[in-house]
Every structure is written in structure tokens, then in C-alpha cells.
């Protein structure tokens, strides 16, 4: 059997970390088994679906590197992989189920259903549909529909009965049909429900494994019943535990950003995101946190996915991003940061500036956790006027010895023979000795004077990259501002 898996995001929101993890697990499972990864669009909710969300989902699947073999935009034998373009098929299936009595029309109005639901709850009975229209004879039902009476279509769940299945993550499940009401498959306006559209697609597209969020576990008996009624091959299910915030509550906007886009914009790189998402519930079997993608593909098994809730912690993600940033080849790091630097400066860099950036970049790379940290740290190299960070200034530039420090630094730096890191360091260390100052007291003011901030790349290299003329000018500028 060739593995065929899918994700089925609804374009009703931005691509978020939860669906990102689900997509990744499907992708890893498909790649591990040499199978097919499919992306379809569950876009039947016309009111909430937008093209912007659809684009965001596909853009970020690609950004993560989760290319799909079949599906929306890429096509395939079951194109189009878009539910709104398959409505006829859902009607055809509904008619077939009605014809054999596996489904039946329901004439109950929303108001009636609501009233009975309340009554049931008040009497302590289960609030699900009570099956009232199931006993209407097919001839009567046909006549009522013919007369124009609005009807939805419900699935006739076998009673008594139960649906048992083995969930790859959660183990054996056995659901008594007493807990599964006769669910709607087609609404009275003719639109298919999620249960119908999803099951028909899974059967039609030959899906072998459904790997999705635990919030859909209670729908699975319905999908199994539908799959059987459609004559489909049994599907293997795996339900992934929900993601929690660091406080142990269900992950939501309350915890901060959940959209993958937000993390990308914040300077997370896709390799780190993939690695972090992979570990939200899956363990590669060894005590490792940084795992190469090829190793993940080789080791990924659904049976190693935990059923315990996984915690999404942006601080850990940032830590991991730092690890990945340090592992990038310098050229790669530069290529990823240059667009951000140029956007920050609102201009391109010339060759001489690029050379200075290449000199300083590895030093920033060693310390950064986010790509977005780089531009503000190197800005001082490429602007005529630096703005001073007022907090840094207030903290560092107000001590009594500052005028003497700046004057001594200017004296020393103006006479060194070669403007290189080693000579700059030697001159400034000699200055510290003469003034009897610690590096923190004596060098931090120079950092603020030349870069505007107490956070910058290492000082001696920064001065080399800036050049002697601009360095002396900034020291003088800072002295004048004291
Ligand atoms: N369209 C559903 C959602 O966005 C997913 C359906 C499924 O995976 O079965 O949550």
C-alpha cells in the first residue's frame, strides 16, 4: 500500500503553528514511507474563507519547505483539490445514500431543533438529535420535498451499534453509537457539512492515513461510518494532541502570536521552525533537540508521537533559532539578512559596504537569536548620522570620567599606524591602563559613542569596520553632546 496523506486547512485564518505541526507530521510520514503528501482546501465556509488566508497557508507551507505532491495549485489526478469546486460530487453521494436509506431527509427547523435540545437538557437527556425524521417513510419524505419543504439530509447511524478503531497515537477507541447522533451531511441550503465533504474527499483521493488534531477525534466515528457507506478502504487515523501555551492552557492568541507569518517576520528561519514544530509531541528517540531534516524523515513514526499535550514556547523556539543561525554558512547568513538590512536603511549597499558587512557579520551571527536583530546592530556602519539610544546614553554617558575617556581614545586612535582590530585593541587597552578603568567603564562609552547603543557587535572589530575617520568624528560628536 502506498501511503497517501493530506492536510485540509480551511482558509478561514492565517497558517498557524498548530496546522504547521500537523502539516509537518503528515509530510514527514509521507516522506518516511515514500508516499504522497496532498494539500486540499476545505473552503466550503464561504463566509469566513478568504483568498488572503488561502495564499498565506500555501505561502507558509512552501516557506517551511513542505512541498506537496498533489493538491491545490500543483494539481494531480483528483484536481481540483478544492471543496467548493466539488459540490456536485457531494450531492451525487448524498443522493446515493438517500436512495439506499443510509441517509434520510430531516424536516425539523432550526427553531424546533433548538427547542427540543433545550427540553432534553432540562430533563437531563442527551441534547443530540432525537431521530424524529428517521421514521418518515421515503414516499412521504419525497412528497414533502416535492412540495418544496426545506430539508437537510442526515446520516442514519446504525442503532444499536458502536464504532471501534485504533488510533495510531491514542490507542484503541470504541464509541457507542448512543453517543453519535444522526448527523447532518447536507444542509437545507444544499451545502455539504465538513463530515460529508471531508469523508468523500478522503475516499475519492485514496487517503490511507488521516493525521490531524485531536479536536477532530469526536468526528472520526462519523467519518468511519461515511467511509464504509461510500465503500471506501478503511483509513488509519492518528490524532495529535493539542498545543498548549507555556501556562499549560490551550494555545491561543492570548499567548501571543500563533501565525507562522508572525514568527517569520520576527526573524525565525524555516529550518528552526521545522525542527521546533517536529519536537512538539514527537521524539526522535534520542535525547537530542537539534535534528537534521533528513534524520527526522528517516526516524519519523506515528507510534512515537506522544498523546500528551505539547507546549509551544516561543522562547524555546528563539533559542533553537539561535542554534540554527550559528550553523548557517556565513554567506547564507548574509544572504538572509541583507534584505532586512537594506530595508532598514531604505537603500542598497555598495561593494565597499558589503565588504565591511561581511567582515562584521560573523560576529553578529555568533550572538543573534533572530534575523531581525542584525539590521539594528549594523546600522551604525552605514549611516551618516547615528541616533543615540537614550537609555544607553543615560546609563553609560553620564559618569564623571566620560570626557577624559573620549579624549584619551581620540588621542590614541588618531596615531595608530594601521587601522586594524589588533592595533585598535592594543591602543585602547593601553588607554584603560593609564586611566585605571575596567573595560566596562572605559570601553562601553566608546561603544555608545560610535554605535549609538550599548548593544553592538564587538567593539574593536566594529571600529575597524567603521573606519578611522568616522570613528574619530563620532567620538568628537559624543564629546560635544555631553
Ligand atoms: N478542514 C479542517 C480544519 O481546518 C481539517 C479537516 C481534517 O483534517 O479532517 O480544521
Image (cartoon, rainbow, N blue to C red):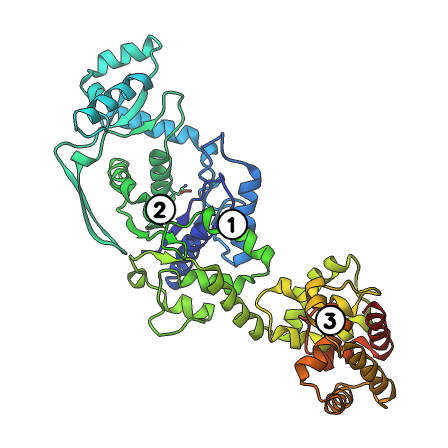
Task: Name the residue at 74% across, 89% down.
Answer: 422
Label 3: which secondary element: loop
Q: Is residue 109 visible?
A: no
The residue beneath circle 3 is: 398
Q: In this orientation, which residue lies closer to the viewer: 148 or 449?
A: 449
Q: In this orientation, which residue lies closer to the viewer: 307 or 382?
A: 382
Observer-side mark, 2 or 3, equals: 3
Left or right, residue 190 beside residue 55: left
Spatial CA span between label 2 and label 3: 72 Å
Q: In this orientation, which residue lies closer to the viewer: 387 or 401?
A: 401
Left or right, residue 57 beside residue 419: left
Task: Name the residue at 43% across, 53% down.
Answer: 23
Task: Name the residue at 17% across, 36% down.
Answer: 177
Q: In this orientation, which residue lies closer to the viewer: 426 or 261?
A: 426
Q: Residue 206 carries which label?
A: 2
The image shows residue 248 at horizontal and vertical percentages of 36, 55
Spatial CA span between label 3 and label 1: 43 Å
- Quadrant, the C terminus: bottom right
Q: Quadrant of residue 447?
A: bottom right
The image shows residue 458 at horizontal and vertical percentages of 68, 78
Q: Please rate how many residues cluster around mark 3, counting C-alpha atoms within 10 Å: few if below 14, some from 14 to 19, many from 20.
A: few
The residue beneath circle 1 is: 259
Spatial CA span between label 2 and label 1: 30 Å
Which quadrant of the picture is home to ligand 1? top left
Q: Farthest residue to the front: give it.
A: 400
Q: Using the image, determine if residue 384 lies above or below residue 236.
A: below
Observer-side mark, 3 or 1, equals: 3
Q: Earlier in the sequence, mark 2 or mark 3?
A: 2
Q: Using the image, determine if residue 100 lies above or below residue 481.
A: above
Q: Which of marks 2 and 1 is nearer the N terminus?
A: 2
Amino acid at each position: 500500500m502506498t501511503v497517501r496523506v493530506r492536510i485540509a486547512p480551511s482558509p478561514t485564518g492565517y497558517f498557524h503553528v498548530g496546522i504547521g505541526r500537523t502539516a509537518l507530521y503528515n509530510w514527514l510520514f509521507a516522506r518516511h514511507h515514500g508516499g504522497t503528501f496532498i494539500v486540499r482546501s476545505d473552503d466550503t465556509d464561504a463566509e469566513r474563507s478568504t483568498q488572503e488566508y488561502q495564499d498565506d497557508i500555501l505561502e507558509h507551507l512552501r516557506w517551511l519547505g513542505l512541498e506537496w505532491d498533489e493538491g491545490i495549485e500543483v494539481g494531480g489526478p483528483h484536481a481540483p483539490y478544492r471543496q467548493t469546486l466539488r459540490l456536485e460530487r457531494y450531492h451525487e453521494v448524498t443522493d446515493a445514500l438517500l436512495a439506499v436509506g443510509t441517509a434520510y431527509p430531516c424536516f425539523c427547523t432550526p427553531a424546533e431543533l433548538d427547542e427540543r435540545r433545550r427540553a432534553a437538557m432540562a430533563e437531563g437527556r442527551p441534547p443530540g438529535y432525537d431521530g424524529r425524521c428517521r421514521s418518515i417513510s421515503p414516499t412521504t419524505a419525497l412528497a414533502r420535498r416535492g412540495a418544496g419543504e426545506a430539508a437537510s439530509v442526515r446520516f442514519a447511524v446504525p442503532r444499536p451499534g458502536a464504532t471501534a478503531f485504533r488510533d495510531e497515537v491514542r490507542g484503541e477507541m470504541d464509541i457507542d453509537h448512543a453517543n453519535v447522533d444522526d448527523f447532518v451531511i447536507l444542509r437545507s441550503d444544499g451545502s455539504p457539512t465538513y463530515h460529508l465533504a471531508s469523508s468523500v474527499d478522503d475516499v475519492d483521493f485514496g487517503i490511507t492515513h488521516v493525521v490531524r488534531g485531536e479536536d477532530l477525534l469526536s468526528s472520526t466515528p462519523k467519518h468511519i461510518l461515511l467511509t464504509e457507506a461510500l465503500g471506501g478502504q478503511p483509513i488509519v487515523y492518528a490524532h495529535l494532541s493539542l498545543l498548549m501555551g507555556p501556562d499549560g492552557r490551550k494555545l491561543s492568541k492570548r499567548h501571543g502570536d500563533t501565525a507562522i507569518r508572525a514568527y517569520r517576520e520576527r526573524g525565525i528561519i524555516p529550518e528552526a521552525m521545522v525542527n521546533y514544530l517536529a519536537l512538539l509531541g514527537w521524539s526522535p528517540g534520542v535525547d537530542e533537540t537539534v535534528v537534521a531534516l533528513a534524520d527526522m524523515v528517516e526516524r519519523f513514526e506515528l507510534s512515537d508521537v506522544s498523546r500528551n499535550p505539547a507546549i509551544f514556547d516561543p522562547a524555546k523556539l528563539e533559542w533553537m533559532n539561535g542554534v540554527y543561525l550559528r550553523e548557517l554558512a556565513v554567506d547564507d547568513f548574509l544572504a538572509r539578512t541583507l534584505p532586512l538590512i537594506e530595508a532598514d536603511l531604505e537603500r542598497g549597499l555598495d561593494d565597499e559596504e558589503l565588504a565591511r558587512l561581511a567582515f562584521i557579520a560573523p560576529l553578529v551571527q555568533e550572538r543573534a537569536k533572530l534575523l531581525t536583530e542584525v539590521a539594528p546592530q549594523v546600522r551604525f556602519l552605514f549611516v551618516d548620522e547615528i541616533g543615540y539610544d537614550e537609555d544607553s546614553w543615560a546609563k553609560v554617558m553620564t559618569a564623571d570620567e566620560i570626557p577624559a575617556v573620549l579624549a584619551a581614545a581620540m588621542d590614541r586612535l588618531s596615531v595608530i599606524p594601521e587601522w586594524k582590530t589588533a592595533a585598535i585593541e592594543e591602543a585602547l587597552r593601553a588607554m584603560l591602563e593609564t586611566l585605571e578603568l575596567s573595560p566596562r567603564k572605559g570601553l562601553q562609552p566608546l561603544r555608545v559613542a560610535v554605535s549609538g547603543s550599548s548593544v553592538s557587535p564587538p567593539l574593536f572589530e566594529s571600529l575597524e569596520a567603521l573606519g578611522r575617520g568616522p570613528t574619530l568624528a563620532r567620538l568628537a560628536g559624543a564629546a560635544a553632546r555631553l
